[in-house]
Image (cartoon, rainbow, N blue to C red):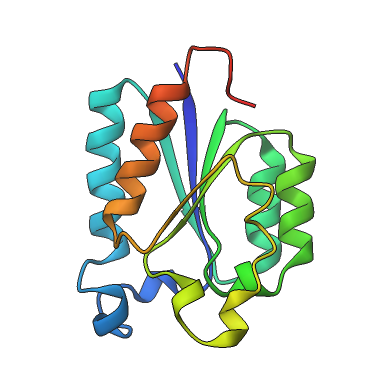
């Protein structure tokens, strides 16, 4: 069974209340619940992890108990060479997800340290982007072209 880690970065624990005009009203717990149900229907195993601490996210990646990663690095997308290095270093494919489209927002959000190493990117699709990432992984799993 394909194992998927869903990794959420800083401030995503505030989904549902933080800037709902940008991020919507759905909470992270609601997203994770939907993803667990969707993963089960696709025959995927899923583990969700969120932290406001860069090192905790990197430490979780280093465990390598998964085949794929869905990453919403949040603000670390624009600042963290260390997270980029961890994602490259673990040798697992990943889908980069962003609820909004950072390229359509403030100029500082146009810097992205992950885009060129991601297997797939889903941006600006709202919280549905997470399910789209699971569907993408499901389509790729078992075909030998994961990496």
Q: Residue at x 70, y 52 (%)?
A: 59
Left or right: 25 as drawn, with respect to 8: left
**Residue nearest the observer in this picture, 133 or 49:** 133
Farthest residue, direction top: 143
Q: How many marks?
A: 0
Can you say which quadrant of the picture contains the N terminus? top left
Left or right: 60 as drawn, with respect to 139: right
Farthest residue, direction front: 104
Question: Residue 142: horizontal and vertical position, in percent?
Answer: 48, 12
Can you say which quadrant of the picture contains the C terminus? top right
Question: Residue 133: horizontal and vertical position, in percent?
Answer: 40, 42
Q: Residue at x 44, y 77 (%)?
A: 104
Q: Residue at x 49, y 73 (%)?
A: 102
Left or right: 107 as drawn, with respect to 91: left
Left or right: 116 as drawn, with respect to 10: right
54 in relation to 58, above or below: below
38 in relation to 16, above or below: above
Q: Residue 25 appears in which quarter of the rendering?
A: bottom left
16 in relation to 72, above or below: below
Question: Residue 19: horizontal and vertical position, in percent?
Answer: 31, 85
Q: Residue at x 58, y 19 (%)?
A: 145
Question: Residue 72: horizontal and vertical position, in percent?
Answer: 49, 59
**Residue nearest the observer in this picture, 78 or 55:** 78
């Amino acid at each position: 069974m394909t194992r998927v880690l869903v990794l959420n970065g800083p401030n995503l624990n505030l989904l549902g209340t933080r800037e709902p005009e940008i991020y919507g009203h759905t909470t992270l717990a609601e997203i994770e619940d939907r993803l667990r149900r969707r993963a089960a229907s696709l025959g995927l195993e899923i583990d969700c992890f969120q932290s406001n601490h860069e090192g905790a996210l990197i430490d979780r990646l280093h465990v390598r108990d998964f085949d794929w990663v869905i990453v919403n690095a949040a603000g670390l997308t624009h600042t963290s060479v260390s997270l980029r290095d961890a994602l490259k270093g673990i040798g697992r494919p990943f889908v980069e997800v962003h609820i909004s489209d950072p390229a359509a927002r403030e100029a500082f959000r146009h810097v992205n340290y992950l885009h060129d190493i991601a297997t797939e990117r889903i941006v600006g699709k709202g919280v549905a982007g997470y399910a789209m990432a699971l569907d993408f992984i499901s389509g790729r799993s078992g075909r030998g072209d994961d990496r």
